[in-house]
Amino acid sequence: MTHSTPLLLGVHAHQPVGNFPHVIDDAVYRCYHPFLEAMHRFPEFPFAIHISGWLLAYMIDQHPRTVTLLQEMVARNQAELVGAGDTEPVLAAIPHADRIAQIEAMTSRLEKHFGQRPVGAWLTERVWDPSVVPALNEAGVRYVMVDDYHFLCAGAAEHQLGGFHRTEENGQSIDVFPISEALRYRLPFSEAAAAVSYIEGISEQYPGSAGIYFDDIEKFGVWPETYSWVYEKGWLEQFLGGVLDSAHIQPVRFRDYLAQNRPQGIIYLPTVSYSEMNEWTLAPDAARCYAAFREQEKTAGRLEKRKALIRGGTWKNFLTRYPESNWMHKRMLQLSQRFHALPRRQQSKTMREDLHEAQANDAYWHGLFGGIYLPHLRRAVFNAIVRLEAQLDRIQARPALETTDVDMDGVGELLYHNHALQLIIRPEPGAAVVEWDC
């Protein structure tokens, strides 16, 4: 073996806005802290990490020892911080101005506590929409990561998945890394030695290719049985040591790889997320057809070659599938318009923070681990909506009774309110109170 494989390894840590403190604490004890402790013992192993802003604020307040570990690794240039929208919004689902403000809020948070401005950004749930490129560019983001599935959906070949590509929208460009599905399935689930051997073979099969990994850190301790496997049985220590002992793997930070290499070419990715998301977002009948078709192709041995052509729906389909999701989303959009219509001097920090909390992604959709079904997550979004609306009303009063098509279904709702309460009434079909705010 003569080739050396650059290894770009990154992890993403997230907890939903409004999640229970004991759940977050458990994740810190079983995953975030032991992972960072292990990385701290291998200073020669560079890596990237993204921690969503709301979670990071909680950890700074409640788990300073864990944050200190990360600060030390940033200071010694081992850890590369990756930005994002501060409250982890799906950028494609919020207005352009809020995309930029969310990214800048996260950048400011990282610069304040770690002294490093990120050049990369994590896309929530790896939801890609070309419309986000201008906001990313204007916010100073140079690169993002998405699944290699996104690239395959654009027609890319296997040998093109070992480095970053450039994309643009309206002449504004960023670079895009394809995350290896094969590595996501191996780390941390295969034997450490087998994972190291697989990474060694990447550049042997495709000379010049890198191993690109960026996935949920919760796989390293929070997922069932992973704490025992990763820490008590020593998988992470074995993997880190194995990589560093290998003469054919070179761990490198994303930003350094970006600086030392050219893009492989230009690419235009379709609106897509990971394949499971594309199924979850479909209505039940369509989802059953989608699942049956995938199973048919799998049984016939054709799925691996054809999976990029079987895409399902897009993330925004959740807004059509769930009226509750659409209602929250349209309430948030209307308040965003009111906020941005104010003169800059009247846009307070508290108002902006409430707007950002109202854009946190988790209550708008569902995956395997909850989401819109969890009332405490919806409650957190609605609390932020109501707080923001009250502040806006104090600055710019509305009529006591007004008609607005809140959910954009073509039928107006009645908004009846005073200084303390608000009733939103849907006249058709049954004159129902659909929201009651204090």
Image (spheres, grey):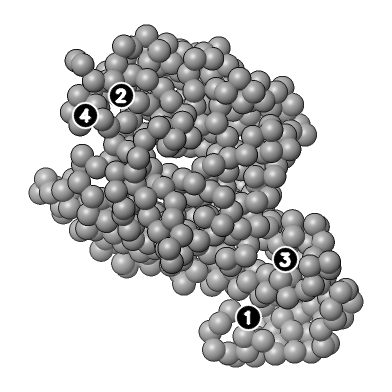
Q: In this view, does 111 lie above or below 303?
A: above
Q: Where residue 89 sits in the image (x, y, percent)?
A: 58, 55
Residue at the spot 58% in from the left edge and 16% down from the top edge? 40
Of label 4 and label 2, which has the lower sequence position? 2
Q: What residue type is labelled 2?
A: Thr
Q: Mark 3 points at which residue?
A: 385
Question: Which mark lies nearer to you, 4 or 1?
Answer: 4
Residue at the far top in the pictured view: 245
Q: Is residue 292 above or below residue 325?
A: above
Residues tagged 3 and 1 counted as in contact (Cβ below 8 A): no
Q: Name the residue under label 2.
A: 5
Question: Which mark lies nearer to you, 1 or 2?
Answer: 2
Of label 1 and label 2, which has the lower sequence position? 2
Residue at the spot 74% in from the left edge and 70% down from the top edge? 339
Quadrant location, the C terminus:
bottom right
Q: Mark 4 points at which residue?
A: 207
- Judged from the image, the secondary structure of the residue bearing numbered disc 3 is helix
- Between the C-alphas of marks 4 and 2, the distance is 8 Å
Q: What residue type is labelled 3?
A: Ile
